[in-house]
Image (cartoon, rainbow, N blue to C red):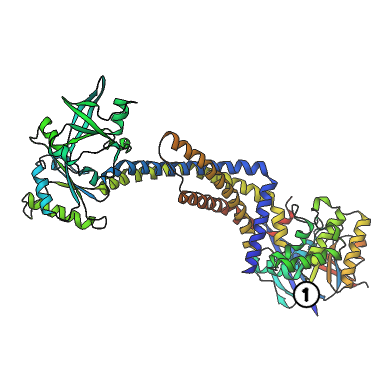
Amino acid sequence: MRRLVYETSEAMKIALSAIWANKARGVLTTLGIVIGIVAVVATMTAANGLENSFKESISAVGSDVVYVSRMPWIIMDDFFKYRNRQPLTLKDAKKLETRLASARAINPTTSTRRDIRYRSAKMEGVRAVGTTDKHIMVTTALPEYGRFLNSIDVQYKRNVCVIGKEIQEKLFKDINPLNKKIRIGRYNYRVVGVMEKQGSAGFFNGPNFDRQVFVPITSFMKNYGSRNRDFDIAVKAPSQEAMVDFEYAVIGEMRNIRKLRPTEDDNFSVNQMTTLMNAYDNVMGNMVLIGLLITSVSLFIGGIGVMNIMFVSVTERTREIGIRKAIGAKKRAILIQFLFEASVVCLIGGTLGVLASIGVTELINAFFLPASLSPGIVVVALVVSAATGIIAGFIPAVKAARLNPIEALRYE
Amino acid sequence: MKALEIQNITKTYQMASVEVHALRGVSLEIKDNEYIAIMGPSGSGKSTMMNVIGCLDTPTSGNYLLEGEDVSHMGDDQLAEIRNRKIGFVFQTFNLIPRSNVLHNVELPLIYGGMSASKRRELAEAAIERVGLSDRADHKPNELSGGQRQRVAIARALVNNPSIILADEPTGNLDSATGEEIMQILNELHNAGNTIILVTHENEIADHAHRIVRLRDGMIESDEVTK
């Protein structure tokens, strides 16, 4: 055991001095690993950034909220199974409210697409959402300034609205939008608040929460009609932990409200944040895997470079290996020596790669996504680079360890 | 006490399809503190003999007892251990590690022997002092003359207090004056109680030994005590 420690510390000294003795070669070999590690780390960071940005954009959904809707948010199977379902009504929402006493809040919403105008500025096909003052209880989004709709707005069907960040930026630019009149479709609304930025799930073809305008559900129905309107009902669970049970309670009550017999399928859908997360994981999980696979190729090539150089190193030092064996180095000692050399080269490459990745992450951050280089990724990168060294160094090291001392000593 | 005993060993190499009989039944006994020269022209089996005695190779048949321990059937790692503990090599070409300084070169057998750093340093410094190179301990081999390099090699050979010191043409790469200095050191080691085996083809060098064994065609031609 003690001997192994001395052999290992000797191996480390030899490895460092061998690398130091061939600096140019070391730099070139290391470069291959650096590029490989940067590629892999950048992929992981970008994936991380995509996930962060996606989570950020759906955070408005609220993780402790169940959404009852006519359709599932993500349709994985046959769309025609769902198309004949009856819309959910405001009455359904009311009934659910009386039956589900445990819910912390129940908020029905409905929406339509309208063009909106402020003076000459115009945005087409903006999602106008009819909702109530309880809206801010079921989502995490808050007004950035001004206020959200209140119960008086709802009760008196007032034509007031709260606009999303993107609408404020595009319609008003530098003008303060509060108390300005905008047209939503053919009706005038007074702006009372601006929602904070929520980010866009645009790449996922999901809803853009910054490009919507909230109006009281009552004035919505008065202005845009209430016939055949389909409502989404957001139901906030008593606690995060109770979500699973609560979802079943909601399904049970909805089946009662819709008078379904036990043998009938649900004619409504219950969605929640995890529905979106799972869909994201399904799609992105595979894409990230493919990305990692492709970038690993460059690391693999770097590893081949290391293996190549290790073969050169073993051949060059055949005589030295012979000397070491003659004076009593066992196979293990020689093996450790060359494995060390390969892993030190790769670990240096890995470290430089991680440092370079910090820069790459900053670039991704600045131009594309909120990417971050987590400590986990750094550890993975270093472990992977050391492992690359051990794998790449293994065959050359075994070759060195197996050298016959007599032939090695005679080698010129 | 016998330092080593070789009983009727043979060594056969397979070169392509031809069998080469390098040793054809050699028996030899060497006692503790003997100073013996093994001589012979090239092709006599001299190198093979030295490889077997040095535990770098095993005989095809026959037995080799080193301090009573049968080493003729050992595996590579066991042989490495035996070399580490019982044999000190001095080579014609010095065979020092080029990037390591004198101290480290001399310490190397002790490192592979698993000795602690402080003990190692103590023994290595003592060995370096014995060959008179204390003021050169931190020099690299390429900063030393040939004679100095060979002295480093001798220090390395004796640092682990081996049963035998095996010197293979130790003066072959040195001018005669320097060669004579090296032989003086070997003589001193012999006087201090070490067993020394010289492998050489030079009579002048062999004259330092007290017993000369001559090989020819893989067999012992003569074995005489000269001093």
Is residue A265 among the parts visible in the rendering?
no
Q: Position of residue B19 (x, y in %)?
A: 69, 60
Q: Is A74 on the left or on the right of B150, as rendered?
A: left
Which of B46 and A19 lies nearest the eye of the viewer?
A19
Q: Position of residue A403 (x, y in %)?
A: 65, 57
Depicted A225 relative to depicted A312: above or below: above
Which of A190 and B41 lies nearest the eye of the viewer?
A190
Q: Position of residue A14 (x, y in %)?
A: 68, 55
Q: Label 1, on which residue?
A: B4
Q: Residue at x 52, y 43 (%)?
A: A301
Which quadrant: the C terminus of chain B?
bottom right
Q: Residue at x 67, y 59 (%)?
A: A10
- Outermost residue toward the bottom? B1
Is residue A245 among the parts visible in the rendering?
yes
Q: Is A323 on the left or on the right of A163, as rendered?
A: right
Q: Amino acid at mark 1?
A: Leu
Which quadrant: the N terminus of chain B?
bottom right
Depicted A190 relative to depicted A91: above or below: above
Tag 1 subunit? B
Specify few, some or many for label 1: CA neighbours under 10 Å numbering under 14, 14-19, or 20 or more: many
Depicted A353 relative to depicted B32: above or below: above
Q: Is B160 on the left or on the right of A173, as rendered?
A: right
